[in-house]
């Protein structure tokens, strides 16, 4: 990867979009942006505002730090784990068991899916 922050951003944006298997149009729709804006961000001809950066990160389920090259981790695992724990602890035993089964199934699928790069 390039060392210029603007180059890192456009590379990370494209990589995260492709990892999530989204077209530029699909990402734009999820982020409430124009498809042309996503294209401009990926080519480096435009830079997103802070609001649009957050929208892109939320739509891609990655951190803004990942998009900006400040970390190599796509997701903030502690934040995600805290959120899951809050929901999980409020479930009955029966629903916790269902959640465990579902998470195991998702983890198994994730092992089969390799990041595109």
Image (cartoon, helix red, strand yellow):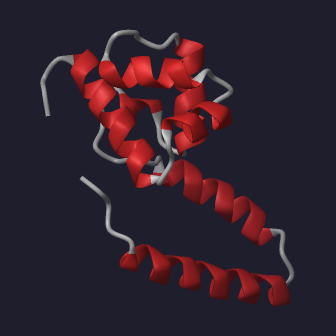
Residue sitting at x 53%, y 42% = 60
In the image, is 33 to the left or to the right of 117? right
Which of the two residues, 110 or 96, is positioned nearer the viewer here?
110
The relative height of residue 114 versus residue 12 in the rendered view (above or below) is: below
- The quarter in which the N terminus is drawn is top left
Residue 3 position in % (x across, y down): 13, 23
In the image, is 94 to the left or to the right of 61? right
Which of the two residues, 102 or 38, is positioned nearer the viewer here?
38
Residue 74 position in % (x across, y down): 40, 47
Residue sitting at x 53%, y 13% = 50
The relative height of residue 29 versus residue 84 in the rendered view (above or below) is: above
In the image, is 35 to the left or to the right of 84? left
Labels in figure, total: 0
Residue 14 position in % (x across, y down): 36, 37
Residue sitting at x 68%, y 26% = 32
Residue lying farthest to the right in this orientation: 92
Residue 36 position in % (x across, y down): 51, 19
Q: Quadrant of residue 95?
A: bottom right
Observer able to see residue 32: yes
Residue sitting at x 32%, y 68% = 114
Observer able to see residue 69: no
Which of the two residues, 46 or 3, is positioned nearer the viewer here?
46
């Amino acid at each position: 990867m390039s060392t210029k922050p603007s180059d890192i951003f456009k590379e990370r944006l494209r990589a995260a979009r492709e990892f999530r298997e989204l077209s530029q149009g699909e990402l734009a729709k999820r982020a409430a942006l124009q498809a042309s804006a996503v294209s401009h961000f990926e080519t480096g001809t435009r830079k997103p505002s802070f609001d649009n950066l957050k929208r892109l990160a939320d739509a891609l389920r990655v951190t803004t730090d990942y998009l900006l090259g400040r970390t190599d981790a796509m997701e903030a695992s502690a934040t995600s784990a805290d959120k899951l724990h809050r929901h999980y602890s409020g479930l009955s035993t029966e629903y916790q068991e269902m959640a465990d089964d579902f998470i195991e199934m998702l983890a198994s699928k994730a092992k089969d899916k390799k990041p595109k790069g």
